[in-house]
Structures are given as structure tokens and as C-alpha cells.
Amino acid sequence: MSTNRRRHANVVPLAKIAALVLVGVAACAGGLGYVWCKNQLYTTGTEIKALERELGELQNRNEVALSKIAQLSSTAKLQERYNSGFIKLVPISNDHIAVMGNDVPKVKAGELRPASNDSTHE
């Protein structure tokens, strides 16, 4: 006996539809990922530009501050402020000056000196 061929004639090809749906989902996911990456690149680029502008402004402000410091600490400006009485300085007398030397005190022969060796103390 022959089988009924009509029974398989109207079957929906689920495997083919599932494969096409998976390919479509993968293509959509890839497109969305591409758009998201491009958007991130643009956003990061604008942030970098803003930070570079801010860095330039800070460098300019730093240069202005350094030039102002150099101007105010110049000898002429300090002398002018001293003469106007803004800076109160008192001359140092010789009895207030302490002279420090690098001379090591000489040890008398036979004199005991305290000594410490850190490597022996554990």
C-alpha cells in the first residue's frame, strides 16, 4: 500500500523559518551593535575635545600664575615693597648667627665610646 502523500504537502517548514529568523536576529543585533559603537566613539570624541580645551585653559592659567609669581618675587618688586613698608624685615646681627662646621670631634686615646649595631638587635 502506498502512503498518503497529501499528509506532508501542507506542512509549514519550521526549520527553514527558524533559520531565517536567527539570521535576521543576528543581522539586527550586528546593526545595533555597530550603531552603538559609532555612538560611543562620537560621545567619547566630544568628551576628549572638551577635556583638551579645559587642559589648554588650565595650562594658560598656570602660565599666567607662574609669570605673576616671577614678577612679584623679582628683586626690584621686593625692594619696592620693602621700601613702602609692606615687608617688615629686621637685619640679623652677628650674635644671632650660628656657624655650623663639619668637623668630627677627636676621640682621646683609650676613651670608651657608646656604639650600636642595628643588625645585632633583633
Image (tube, grey):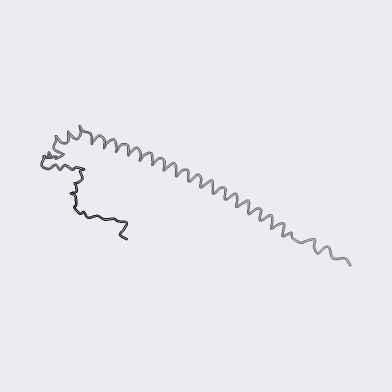
Q: Residue at x 69, y 54 (%)?
A: 20
Q: Nearer the viewer, residue 116 or 101?
A: 116
Name the one closer to the observer, 44 or 6.
Answer: 44
Please give the name of the residue rendered at 23% of the width and 36% of the height, measured from the top-left corner. 73
Residue 15 falls left or right of residue 47: right
10 vs 66, left or right, is right
Residue 80 shown left or right of residue 21 in the figure: left
Q: Quadrant of the C terminus?
A: bottom left
- The quadrant holding residue 18 is bottom right
Residue 26 coordinates in the image, percent (x, y): 63, 53
Q: For the N terminus, which image quadrant? A: bottom right
The x and y percentages for residue 118 are: 30, 56
Q: Position of residue 109 (x, y in %)?
A: 19, 49
> Which of the 4 quarters of the picture holds residue 79?
top left
Residue with the most extreme right position:
1
Q: Please provide percent x and percent y for residue 65.
A: 29, 38
User: Residue at the front extreme?
Assistant: 110
Q: How many marks overall?
A: 0
Residue extending farthest bottom: 1
Residue at image coords 76%, 61%: 11
Left or right of 88? Residue 63 is: right
